Amino acid sequence: MHIRVPATVRIGLGLLLIGVGSYAGIEHWMSTRIVRPVDMPVSLAKGHIHTGPFRLNLRTQYWILVDPGQWWMNPTCDRYRLLTRWTLFQDRKVVAERDESAADGYYYLPTNDLAPGVYDLDLEVLSDTSCLNSGRPRLAVAAYTQNYETGAFILKALGVVCVVLGVYMLTFLPIVRLVGSREQISRVTDAVTVGQHFQWAQRLPLRRPFSGLPAFGLFAGPFFAFVVFVVIMNNGLGYHSKGLWVHLLKPGETPKKSDPWTEPLIVRLEDGGPGHEPKLLVNAKQVSWDDLDLALRQELGRRRDWVVYVEGDDCIPWSNVTAVIDLARGDHAKVFLLTENAGKDCGWSPLPGARQ
């Protein structure tokens, strides 16, 4: 006994299996790629830093990143004095090396395309910048994965298209054909009596019911809608928002209380003079930079709404203000930036990055 399987069912099952298999395979392959083989805390005192052996399994360009961390915690330390030299080994052979000086706080040292294998990195800090250690610096090796991610997205999108087409051919298309065939049968047998020679009364070929929908439209509509969705999503790749989200008060508006029993939480930064870090005032109470996180958590714990208002003198570096904003947002608080200009005369040349 042979069971005849319609062609649409066979094609639908094939597309469904191909789509599910390709999507799962790409997802598994991407999850097993090592995109950040090294990420370790380091000391930026003068000397050598050894990462030890680490494995790469992507043939792509890699970045050696020396991150000074929260360098603003010690504003008297000049992070631009950081000088490094690195050498990359494979099987005790030098495969890449470079001397690099400081560059705006982050030091991306690109390497050439590296083949998969086991490597070892030696980083030499040429200058004594141990004053940056309070900011918890890190050394990282990261892979450039944009090409792989774009290719994986396209292949996964094709897999989803196959799944959609397979589901459509297994469900919607048979239903449309079944409904159309029933309407056609009911139209043919609409007469009160049907004789055995009814076939001779049919002079013209039967036409499809007016209420029936064209098969091409049912097939092409969902397909092209999904293609448009994939194109829109693909155009959004590579665009990521950067920066710190803050809120601003309307002109003339004052900070609001979260409840009648507590005052608004205001963090003010006051100029400490040349060569000195700004003073921190949490609701008019001075705290140190090291204790700011603890003070914010204690104050936020007493409030129903976690809202922090940040303001600073015109003469302080903007990096100090962003450090406070970043710390408050790290505690999941909503930050309002108070921008009223006090018109204070600094009396001295402001540090680089100070607001003018």
Image: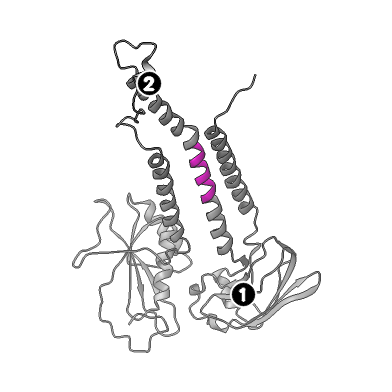
Give the quarter of the image for residue 111: bottom right
Specify the farthest residue to the left.
252
Residue nearest the observer in this picture, 86 or 170: 170
Few, some or many residues within 10 Å of mark 2 (<14, 14–19, 20+)? few
What predominant SS class does the magenta segment belong to?
Answer: helix
Residue nearest the observer in this picture, 257 or 65: 65
- Which callout, 1 or 2, points at the residue further toward the start of the chain? 1
Above-or-below relation of 37 to 354: above
* Mark 1 → mark 2, Cα distance in angstroms: 72 Å
Residue 109 position, x and y percent, is: 61, 76
Q: How many callouts does the rendering have?
A: 2
How was this image coloured?
one colour
Label 2: state its secondary structure: helix
Side of 340 relative to 6 (left or right):
left
Q: What amino acid is at disc 2?
A: Ile
**Any part of residue 236 in sight:** no
Question: If the image is split into quadrants, where does the N terminus sit?
Answer: top right
Q: Which residue is mark 2?
A: 185
Residue 241 position, x and y percent, is: 42, 64
Q: Which residues are magenta?
A: 157-167
Disc 1 + disc 2, Cβ < 8 Å: no
Few, some or many residues within 10 Å of mark 1 (<14, 14–19, 20+)? some
Residue 354 highlighted magenta (yes or no): no
Residue 110 is labelled as 1
| Residue under the image location 48 percent in, 78 percent down | 75
Give the quarter of the image for residue 318: bottom left
Give the quarter of the image for residue 219: top left
Q: What amino acid is at disc 1?
A: Pro
Residue 134 position, x and y percent, is: 56, 71
Side of 260 relative to 103 (left or right):
left
